[in-house]
Image: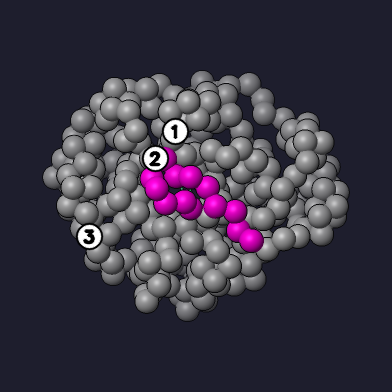
Amino acid sequence: MQSKMAMRAFGGLDRKVSVIGQGTWYLDQGDRAKAVAALRRGLDLGMTHIDTAEMYGDAELVVGDAIAGRRDEVFLVSKVLPSNASRRGTVTACERSLKRLNTDRLDCYLLHWRGQYPLEETVAAFEHLVTQGKIASWGVSNFDADDLHELLAVAGKGRIACNQVLYHLRERAIEHRVVPWCEAHGVTVTAYSPFGHDDFPSPSSAQGRALQAIADQHRATPRQVALAFLTRRPSVIAIPKASSAEHAAENAAGGSLRLSEAEIAALDSAFPRGREPASLPML
Ligand code: NAP
């Protein structure tokens, strides 16, 4: 396998992001030094997109330690909780996150999911934060195509940088309408829980064997193949979470793997997309 991390456009930003980034949910729960080392190893290997959130307990503090002295290498994303996403609350939440991350700016700031505050309020706060230089861009998470359509009417063209949504081999609901909508409007799709959170196919299952067969062709691993499948379209990037440097290194190598059309077709049939569900699945 080649070792160079592929880079992708992110919304309308001039800057590109690594196709494979690093999630941080629950990263504060185990050995903190190990978690910091995992993130730093990921950075060394090109996984410079780091995703966190005010919801993730002390994960922002762990990220702050990991990026100390390396801020300029990182594409840093955090999220505001819907319960804080009023005009004033969004700004205050962002300032709290900046303090915990020990930085003066985010590269993108997301609304974690749609809540009770009108989109107008949250968007006004995001745009204010952009003007202040505290965030370079903003986006959303867990928005279905109808939510995105409403958001576009509020925000105007070219303002929504990304939509972060649940996407893994066994959960392909976003392929029906969310991905096409995002592609039509220049919005990056960030795949969260790309390994199914804790539901990755076991090696002994038929799905596990399908992954392994393709992995063997590339001297890769099933998880690297999964990441390559999810990011096969240029509009999609992924953010697996790893608590060890070994796992981070394995995931980073997935950022240079390209699958053939035949391999993509084989995975498509081993992990069928299924019908569009009534509502967008989320964790
Ligand atoms: P995930 O990335 O799908 O899976 C994480 C699990 O995979 C962990 O148990 C991890 O174990 C394991 N793993 C990772 N790399 C591995 C490797 N190379 N070999 C073996 N096991 C490996 O799950 P996730 O944390 O739910 O999703 C990723 C990120 O997406 C989150 O951390 C968060 O940043 C974001 N997210 C966003 C939302 C949202 O609503 N916007 C929701 C969920 C998640 P170890 O920890 O032992 O390495």
Q: Is mark 1 on a helix, strand or loop?
A: loop
Up the image or down, 71 lies above or below 212; here it is: below
Mark sitting earlier along the chain (2/3): 2
Is ligand 1 less than 8 Å from the beta carbon at label 3?
Answer: no
Q: Mark 2 points at which residue?
A: 12
Write down the region rendered in magenta: 4-17
Measuring 42% from the left and 63% from the top, which residue is drawn there? Answer: 74
Please indicate whether residue 75 sits to the left or right of residue 115 in the image: right
Measuring 67% from the left and 29% from the top, which residue is drawn there? Answer: 273
Mark sitting earlier along the chain (3/1): 3
Measuring 57% from the left and 24% from the top, which residue is drawn there? Answer: 176
* Amino acid type indicated by mark 3: Arg
Disc marking residue 186: 1
* Amino acid type indicated by mark 1: Gly
Q: What element carries label 2?
A: loop
* Amino acid type indicated by mark 2: Gly
* Measured Cα–Cα span from mark 3 to mark 1: 30 Å
